[in-house]
Amino acid sequence: MNWLARLKKIDTTPTAEATEPTKPGFVGFVAPGMAPMQKNRGDSPAANDPTAGAHDPDRWAWPHSQAMTGREIDTFTARLHHFTRRGLAEPDAERVADKLVTRDREADDRRLCLECVHLAGHAGIWGCKNWQRAGVATKPQHAQLSVALVIQPQRCDGFMDQNQQETIR
């Protein structure tokens, strides 16, 4: 019998059951394809499949790693722009915005004066327009704020977020 005739006789449909190995000395069983999973009643893609979860660009970001999600990156960029517009040097603004990513992840309720609508002026000449409620001064002429205070996370009774919604304490 020639090779072509032998190939035509071979049944190529796989069996659903595992079979014993055909080679002597081989320990194991041979089964076709992936077995269905009980939890989702479907086939599980390979762990290294590049198309698995391709629709979710944040699949490897926080909380699975320290990488920022797309939303965190957008917030970081907006904060960086806002802080530099307020007079912080870019390296300082980046450092502060990075610390705020950690603050948000830890659900810390402290805020910065830089995030408040009542902060007036720019770097070096900052002041609080809500100084009485914030408790930072006894007279308006004493309401000037140091850089250390402006970038210090704190709980302030006079804080109002940039979107004009007063925070609830």
Image: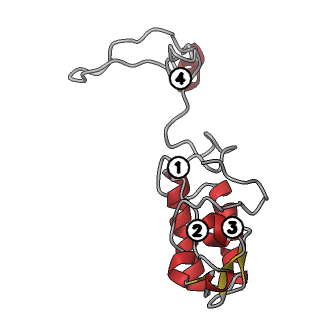
What SS does tag 4 mark? loop
What residue is disc 1 on?
107
Colour mode of the rendering: secondary structure
Residue at (67% x, 52% y) in the render:
167
Marks 3 and 2 sit apart, C-alpha to C-alpha, by 15 Å
Please give the count of numbered marks on the rendered protein. Answer: 4
Looking at numbered disc 4 in the image, what kind of residue is underneath it?
Answer: Asn
Sequence-first disc among 3 and 2: 3
Q: Check disc 2 and report its element: helix, strand or loop.
A: loop
Q: Residue at x 72, y 70 (%)?
A: 118
Q: Amino acid at mark 2?
A: Gly
In whole angstroms, how far apart are the C-alphas of marks 1 and 2?
24 Å
Residue 99 percent across, percent down from the top left: 51, 67
Find numbered disc 3 in the image and state the secondary structure of the residue it sits on.
Answer: loop
Return the disc, 1 or 3, that comes first in the chain's sequence: 1
Image position of 131 (left or right of 11): right
Q: Nearer the viewer, mark 4 or mark 2?
A: 2
Give the residue at mark 3. 116
Q: Is residue 128 left or right of residue 28?
A: right
- The amino acid beneath tag 3 is Cys
